[in-house]
Image: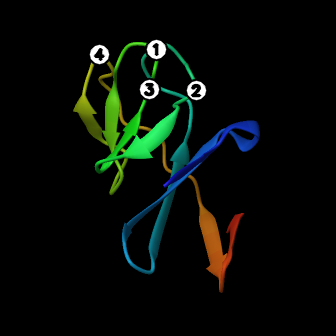
Amino acid sequence: GRVLGAEEIVVTQPEEGEFKAFSAICTHQRCLVSDVSDGTINCPCHGSRFRVTDGSVERGPATRPLPEERITVDGNTIRRA
């Protein structure tokens, strides 16, 4: 996955050829998430982790999932829809 800080979006690839996008703003205290690793989207501020498949909370303190963002995939290009 990749965090696009300027766009405040995080794009993940849970399975080859399947792309998901979520808000990169943590639902706990609105920090920008920092990275994607080991199947989670990670917030550096308080340690919340969100699943790359659906943005749901893997570990708090966040209690709400990351909102999904609509994207389109065309070849090697991913765009916000």
Along the line of sight, which residue is nearer the eye, 75 or 65?
Answer: 75
Q: Label 1: how many residues lie within 10 Å, few (<14), some (14-19) or many (20+)?
A: some
- The circle on residue 45 is 1
Label 4 sits on what residue type? Pro
81 up-or-down from 27: above or below: below
Q: Looking at the image, is mark 1 or mark 4 earlier in the sequence?
A: 1
Would you name the residue on which mark 3 appears?
43
Q: Quadrant of residue 4?
A: top right
Q: Is residue 36 visible?
A: yes
Along the line of sight, which residue is nearer the eye, 44 or 53?
Answer: 44
Q: Looking at the image, is mark 4 or mark 3 earlier in the sequence?
A: 3
Percent from the top left, x then y, of residue 26? 48, 26
Q: Which residue is drawn at 34% across and 24% down?
A: 48
Q: Label 3: how many residues lie within 10 Å, few (<14), some (14-19) or many (20+)?
A: many
Image quarter in which the C terminus is found: bottom right
Q: Looking at the image, is mark 2 or mark 4 earlier in the sequence?
A: 2
8 up-or-down from 76: above or below: above
Marks 3 and 1: CB-CB under 8 Å?
yes
Q: Is residue 81 visible?
A: no
Label 2 sits on what residue type? Leu
Label 3 sits on what residue type? Cys
Q: Distance between the residues labelled 3 and 1?
A: 6 Å
Marks 1 and 4: CB-CB under 8 Å?
no
Percent from the top left, x then y, of residue 78? 67, 69
Closer to viewer: mark 1 or mark 4? 1
Q: In which quarter of the image is residue 9?
A: top right
- The circle on residue 61 is 4
- The circle on residue 32 is 2
